[in-house]
Image (cartoon, grey):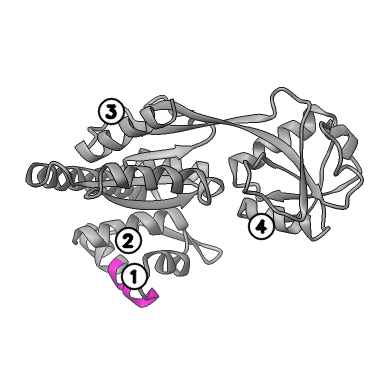
């Protein structure tokens, strides 16, 4: 059993699917299967139950996952501390962030941080908010830029940005010239949305419900730019974060919502009970100053 195989086990536990885990890890499925067999032989029992072609952690697997995540976090912390002693200006930051922040907010911050700390290595991971909370809890990342604030009381939080939400419609839509709009006015429109696994989808569903609308979702996507592209193609309307120029889909119009709760808080999250590496502390301090 080595550190790589423990990491593979953690990813397999999260994906619950051998093929998906192998693809994420960029290894072959037989390699992953053999590693799991060695691990199960080592502990003397199966760690997963096979259910409808998926792998579900059993009670033994839950115990192994808890200790595997803790072991990985401890070894990573030790490696980071040694690296910081050898090179105070270097180190590694493992950062998770939302898909919807990948094309503008995060790249801008990373570019500015690279100018200030060129020797710090950034390991990046895009994910949905739920998965980000899992990564923080399991010690797989040091910091996360996410929304909304995670409910886990063990996580620290610093607000970085507040995004207004809006209704995006095709450029030739009858609403395109509006300056503000109530979602109730779009009750009969086909809706394009993110998948139900995303926190932004939960927020937009709440906004539709607040205006008394049961949205008729005709397309689901996993990226906000994809949602905007489908809207621009005339396939529906959607609620998305208001893009700052020059971002946004040129063939679409973005209309602010009248609902005062049509916004989301984007912030920096970390595990408050876990020591933070010098590089991670430096990046967190940079973010706190950069967005003031």
Q: Residue at x 84, y 30 (%)?
A: 182
Is residue 87 rendered to the left or right of residue 249?
left
Residue 292 can be seen, yes or no:
yes
The picture places residue 123, in percent across and down from the top left corner, at: 32, 52
Q: CA distance from mark 4 to mark 1?
A: 32 Å
How many C-alpha atoms fall within 10 Å of the one at disc 2: few (<14), some, or many (≥20)?
some
Kindly identify which residue carries mark 4: 226
The picture places residue 246, in percent across and down from the top left corner, at: 62, 48
Question: Camera-side residue: 80 or 135?
Answer: 80
Q: Residue at x 75, y 58 (%)?
A: 230
Q: CA distance from mark 3 to mark 1?
A: 32 Å
Q: Earlier in the sequence, mark 3 or mark 1?
A: 1
Kindly identify which residue carries mark 1: 32
Instruction: Quadrant for residue 78, please give it.
Output: top left
Q: CA distance from mark 2 to mark 1?
A: 7 Å
Q: Earlier in the sequence, mark 2 or mark 1?
A: 2
């Amino acid at each position: 059993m080595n550190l790589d195989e423990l990491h593979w086990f953690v990813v397999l536990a999260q994906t619950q699917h051998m093929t998906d885990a192998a693809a994420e890890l960029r290894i072959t499925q037989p390699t992953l299967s053999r590693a799991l067999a060695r691990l199960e032989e080592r502990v003397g029992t199966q760690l997963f139950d096979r259910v409808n072609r998926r792998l579900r952690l059993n009670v033994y697997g839950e115990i192994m996952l808890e200790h595997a995540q803790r072991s990985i976090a401890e070894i990573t912390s030790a490696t980071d501390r040694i690296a910081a002693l050898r090179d105070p200006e270097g180190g590694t930051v493992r950062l998770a962030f939302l898909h919807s922040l990948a094309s503008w907010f995060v790249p801008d911050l990373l570019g500015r941080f690279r100018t200030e700390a060129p020797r710090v290595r950034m390991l990046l991971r895009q994910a949905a908010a739920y998965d980000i909370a899992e990564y923080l809890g399991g010690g797989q990342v040091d910091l996360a830029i996410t929304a909304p604030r995670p409910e886990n009381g063990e996580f620290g939080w610093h607000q970085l940005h507040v995004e207004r939400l809006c209704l995006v419609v095709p450029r030739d839509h009858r609403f395109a010239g509006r300056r503000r709009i109530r979602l109730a006015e779009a009750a009969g429109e086909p809706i394009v949305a993110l998948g139900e696994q995303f926190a932004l989808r939960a927020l937009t569903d709440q906004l539709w419900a607040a205006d008394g609308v049961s949205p008729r979702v005709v397309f689901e996507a996993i990226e906000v730019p994809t949602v905007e592209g489908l809207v621009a193609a005339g396939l529906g309307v959607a609620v998305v974060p208001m893009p700052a120029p020059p971002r946004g889909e040129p063939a679409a119009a973005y209309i602010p919502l009248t609902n005062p709760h049509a916004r989301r808080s984007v912030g920096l999250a970390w595990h408050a009970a876990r020591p933070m590496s010098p590089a991670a502390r430096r990046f967190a301090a940079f973010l706190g100053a950069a967005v003031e």
